[in-house]
Amino acid sequence: MTISLHQHPREATVVDAAPKQLFIGGAWRPATDERSYEVEDPSTGRALCSVADASPADGLAALAAASEAQESWAKHPPRERGEILRRAYELIMSRHEDLALLMTLEMGKPLTESRGEITYAAEFFRWFAEEAVRIGGDYAVAPNGSGRFLVMRLPVGPALLITPWNFPMAMGTRKIGPAIAAGCTSVIKPAHQTPLSMLALAGILQEAGLPDGVLNVVTSRSAGRLMEPMIRDGRARKLSFTGSTAVGRKLIEQSAEQVLRVSMELGGNAPFLVFPDADLDAAVEGAMLAKMRNGGEACTAANRFYVHADVAGEFSQRLAERMSGLRVGRGVSDEVQVGPLIDDAQLGKVRDLVADAVQQGAEVVTGGSAEDGDGYFYRPTVLSGVPLQARMSREEIFGPVAPITTFTDEQAVIAQANDTEYGLVSYLYTRDLQRALRVSEALESGMVGLNQGIVSNPAAPFGGVKHSGLGREGGKVGIEEFLETKYIAVGGL
């Protein structure tokens, strides 16, 4: 493993080209009080640039712009709404390399992963470009024959969108795409750590022909200070949030005052089950994807590995060999496979969780410590014999740490997998078809990866149960979150 702090020659050019101001009503403008904050490069701990730090007044101005544009945007032809998304998709793909580098600089993930996210993000625009013209309704004869039922789907209205730092563009397109396709205007607040990708996306949508006020972007160091006045204002009719369960609960409480329609994609605690008949080659490969995508900083990351005692030793050894061979470093190098954690606080959390597990009897198979030097780097880690009472059995790790616990009984391991407040995604590996279906149905999660380590796909519904959230994003149902059902009773026939 090596860490390189060599500066990429295009870094300054890409950062300089990214917008740094608020995007409100189709215009770029500074914060009302001229305040700004620094965006940090997590691989060095040094500032990349400064962006506008929006005040509550700026947020309300953005909401006013969205509210003013709502009526005309709702009447905009669905085909043209889709064409705008299609043009934006093409612009994203034409700037793929620059957008990937910008993402790597502000978030830290390796260029290979950033390139993958740019493609993934663009696909949401392509998918919802096609869904815009498929918003349907219904026409039916009343059961007694005396009238008709006319049912239509209409945009819910101005939407507030809040995105996390770990997928700074894809989590935006997953919300903006269906909002635009459905005919909803919006105000989006990106995570303060990673605002540049979203600001760049706003510029692309403007270039693609999106009318003024349809999308507004407000960046701020303090999400609560900015968002609460907008949530309580009354002009917004929808809130979509991706982030922690703790913050999601607060937002749901605030949204109750105005009875906002909410979509919540919250935390996860994904179990990864390996049964004795599993294809171990496939299971290890799937584990690498489920654990190490985004360096483990993903709500879908495998958080608890339950491996049958008959294969646990071999699985642990193989996984440790793969993990220990990963190159850690600054993501701008194509050779790097694991970048830094997002900030010092997250690095401290991962350290604490590993220390807690080891104190309670877990064994470090590989890794188990932070890297020396600048940035927030933690070595890819495999722990064996992790007890169920360890904190990482209950809390999201959000880092490159794979904790392994053994099991022998199918029903018992299902109970352990379900023994969590979360229910976003589960993974299982088995070659027994009956077991595959039986366990998949029994796992309490909104998604299941059956013999595969990645479940996310723009064409599939994404979301969880229990404290992992409300609603679904992506797939055919993704646009439903931005549509209301209106029923007209037709009489006199």
Image: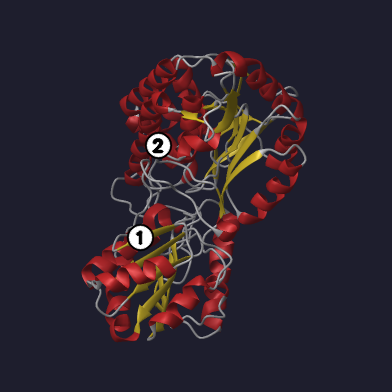
Which is nearer the eye, 34 or 313? 313
How many C-alpha atoms fall within 10 Å of the one at disc 1: few (<14), some, or many (≥20)?
some
Q: Residue at x 53, y 38 (%)?
A: 481
Residue 10 can be seen, yes or no: no
Q: CA distance from mark 2 to mark 1?
A: 21 Å
Q: Residue at x 71, y 21 (%)?
A: 61
Q: Which residue is labeled 1 in the image? A: 449
Which of the numbered marks, if any, corresponds to residue 121?
Answer: 2
Which is nearer the eye, 315 or 72? 72
Badge 1 marks a residue whose secondary structure is: strand
Task: Give the left or right position of residue 394, taking residue 111 as reference.
Answer: right
Which is nearer the eye, 307 or 129? 129
Query: Which x, y percent locates residue 194?
Result: 53, 39
Badge 2 marks a residue whose secondary structure is: helix
Amino acid, disc 2: Ala
Q: Is residue 402 above or below residue 108?
A: below
